[in-house]
Every structure is written in C-alpha cells, then in structure tokens.
Image (spheres, grey):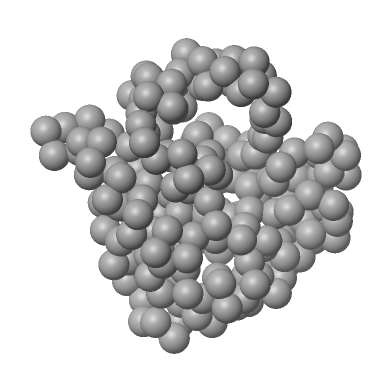
Amino acid sequence: GNQGSTWLIVKEALLKNRPIKITDTTLRDGNQSLWLARLRTEDILPILPKMDQIGFSSIEVWGGAIFDACLTFLKEDPWQRLRAIKERVPKTPLQMLLRGQNLVGYRHYSDDVVHKFVKLAAKNGIDIFRIFDPLNDVRNFRTAIEAAKEAGAHVQGAVVYTISPVHTLEHYLEIAHQLVDMGIDSLCIKDRTALLSPPLPSLVPGEPGLFRKVILR
C-alpha cells in the first residue's frame, strides 16, 4: 500500500496507544509478485520457526497463485505444503488469499466445490480467509464467506481500492456494509496500486463501529 498513508495511520494509532498488528505476506504475495510464486516448499520451511516467534498477527502463506504454481510449475502438492507449514508454525495464525467464487482458480466454481475447498483448507491449517473479488462484486463473496464461517475460521472481507468517477467513498461504504451483513470478522482495504493517500479516519467519517477491525494492504 501507500507508505505515506500507512505511516500516518500508524502514527495516529501510536499517539492514541492503539496496538499495531502486522500480517506478513512474504511467502504468498512477496513470493508471487517477485518470483511468480516459484519458491519451493523446501526453500520456505527453514525460516518458518523463526517467523513463528516474531509475533505477527498472521502469516499469509497460501492462495492467490500459489496453488496453481505448485501444481503447474513446481510439481508439488499444495496441500502437503500447507500441512508442512502448519507443523512448523504452531503459534501464529495462517492466512490465505481466496478469490471468492473463483477460489484459487480462474473461473467460477459451483457452491458445493467452494464449500468443500474451504472446509479442507481450514482442516489443513488455514485460520484466516482473506476473501476478495477483483471487481468488488459482493455476489462472489457470499458462498466463500458462508463456507469459512461454517469451518470456524476468521473471515476477512477484502475491498479492492481504486479511483474513478464511480469508485466513491459511498461506493466503498456500501460494499463494506454488505460484507458486514454477510458476517465478515474484519475488513481489508487492498490498495494494490498505492492510491490511498488520506489517513483512515478521514476516509471513513462517521463509521467508527463498522471499521473497528480494518487492515491495510
């Protein structure tokens, strides 16, 4: 996200003695963005015990393009990778990025497939599901949110941030309210192109209760 904006939010939180929690995304987003998700499981495992001791709020290790890269390019079992990571990270919650109805693929899957996939992901080690849709179409959140709630996981709804005549504050608040009604536990603002510049309190005036748990990414 935007470093300047993030620092303003961190500064305000520190001044008000609010705790700052950090999610490490190195092994998922860093791996995917810098190396096309080509890190092998054997490359990841040695550092995990040390990461588990740092005190991260969560560690994002799965989802996105990781599943596809494991199968297509690395010839690895992505489920075995997840189990191996969980064995070495017993303390810190593990997180994955889930593309809503697309799961970790590139098309919509049926509701029963979504439920089964999410159930198995939780069973094999995922504690937090960061669920998003590239177009912020809330219809593509619903089944994944239901499945994650049924699995007893923490559900984080992620809203993709951009700027355009239709992407107004009211637009984002409407999406956030719909996600809250669906049962999300926290909200993530995905500022993938570093466009978010104002500090969060001025971004969401009059909505302190709704945005009690907001994550910037």
- For the image, the number of numbered tags is 0
Q: Residue at x 70, y 31 (%)?
A: 19
Point out residue 95 in the picture as x, y percentages from the top left corner: 63, 53
Kindly identify the residue that appears in the image at 36 percent across and 82 percent down. Answer: 110
Say whether residue 196 is left or right of residue 74. Answer: left
Quarter of image, res 142: bottom left
Instruction: Give left or right: position of 30 versus 85.
Output: left
Q: What residue occupies the far bottom of the structure in this picture?
A: 112
Camera-nearest residue between 36 and 119: 119
* Position of 135 relative to 27 (above/below): below
Along the line of sight, the residue nearer the viewer: 197 or 75: 197
Q: Does residue 138 appear anywhere in the picture?
A: yes
Image location (x, y in percent) of residue 71: 56, 63
Residue 42 position in % (x across, y down): 78, 49
Residue 7 as seen in the image, left or right of residue 143? right
Q: From the top left corner, tell me how far across and down residue 196 is, in percent.
A: 36, 25
The front one of 139 and 38 is 139
Residue 106, can we see it?
Answer: no
User: Of 150 and 36, which appears nearest the observer?
Assistant: 150
Task: Examine the rendered structure and indicate whether residue 150 appears above or below residue 203.
Answer: below
Q: Report the side of 131 relative to 123 (left or right).
A: left
Q: Residue at x 61, y 61 (%)?
A: 154
Residue 194 higher or lower than 35, as above or below: above
Instruction: Determine the image quadrant of residue 90.
Output: bottom right
Residue at (71, 42) in percent of width and height = 57
